[in-house]
Amino acid sequence: MGPTLFHEIIYGPVKSRRLGNSLGINIIPTNEKVCSFDCIYCECGWTEGFTSNNFINSETFRNILEIHLENLKKNSIELDSITFSGNGESTLHPEFLSITKETISLRDKYFPHAKVTVLTNGSMLHIPQVQEALALIDQPMLKLDSAIQQEFDIINQPMYKVDIKTIIDNYTKLSLPNKIIQTLLLRGKHNGIEIDNTRKESLDALITAINKINPQLWMLYSIDRPTPEQNLVKLTLRELQQIKNDLQDKVNCEINVYA
Ligand code: SF4
């Protein structure tokens, strides 16, 4: 089976490697992928566009989420995380801040111990409302697969010119004690070009960026689901652990690995 879209606004809960029992929140339209990047490993397939006229409005979203949380509570299902993920980049939603606030207030009402998590590629961090929303979120997970422009362009394929230095600067400026950087490590080939962000040069650049950004945690993980580019290799847990052992003393935060 190839990569697939999420056809629901709320999905799961699913057992996640990194988040435990996680309820997925997809505020991207359910029939299209909307992202500012076109990562070669994206579980939703190739990107169709970076804007849409079909975003759900915040009031409808609140009603749908409340029904789901009520049902889960009634059925005594526990949640570790309520997670913004889905068919693209959640921070592209024009009402991301009010949706974040609604989600937090419903979490407080139904599952006060669950964390609210967002997986983001950081491309919208220049927008004050996105910064404000991330400051409210328990686990802001910020994507950084490469700190080298040429490698970033090949792995993450931004839909328009994005300077990876600007993203790193914006992550650095985000003065939150709970910042998490997430890095997908992979090897393979795309359009005839070799990719390997486990090379010394790639890891050295990432170490410099991590020490500048100063996150609470650095997550290293491998491919988990079908990818649009077929010529990619999934790293083993053993390889990730070896990389962690080599890097741990060189960065000022904890490293966790997930395969
Ligand atoms: S940033 Fe996330 S949603 Fe966008 S293409 Fe990359 S993996 Fe997919």
Image: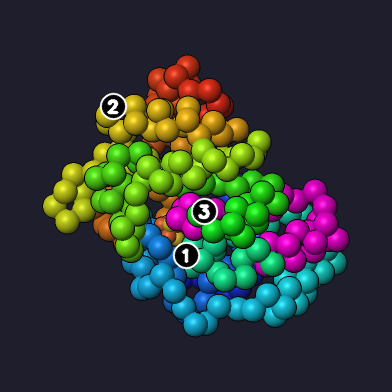
Q: CA distance from mark 1 to mark 3?
A: 16 Å
Label 1 C-beta lies within 8 Å of the nearest ligand 1 atom: yes
Q: Which residue lies under the disc numbered 3?
A: 125
Q: Is residue 167 left or right of residue 74?
A: left
Label whose residue precedes the other's in the sequence (1 or 2): 1
Q: CA distance from mark 1 to mark 2?
A: 30 Å
Crowding around mark 2 (Cα neighbors within 10 Å: few <14, some 14 to 19, many 20+) is few
- Asked whether residue 87 appears in the rendered view, the answer is yes
Label whose residue precedes the other's in the sequence (1 or 3): 1
Residue type at the position of mark 1: Gly
Along the viewing direction, whichever of 20 and 51 lies nearer the viewer? 51
Q: Residue furthest left?
A: 192
Along the viewing direction, whichever of 154 and 227 lies nearer the viewer? 154
Q: Which mark is residue 200?
A: 2
Label 3, secondary structure: give it: loop
Label 2, secondary structure: give it: helix
Along the viewing direction, whichever of 1 and 61 lies nearer the viewer? 61
- Name the mark nearer the viewer: 2 or 3: 3
Residue in the image at 55% along x and 26% along y: 253
Taking 88 as reference, is 15 above or below it? above
Magenta-drawn segment:
99-124
- Name the mark nearer the viewer: 1 or 3: 3
- Asked whether residue 21 appears in the rendered view, the answer is no
Label whose residue precedes the other's in the sequence (2 or 3): 3
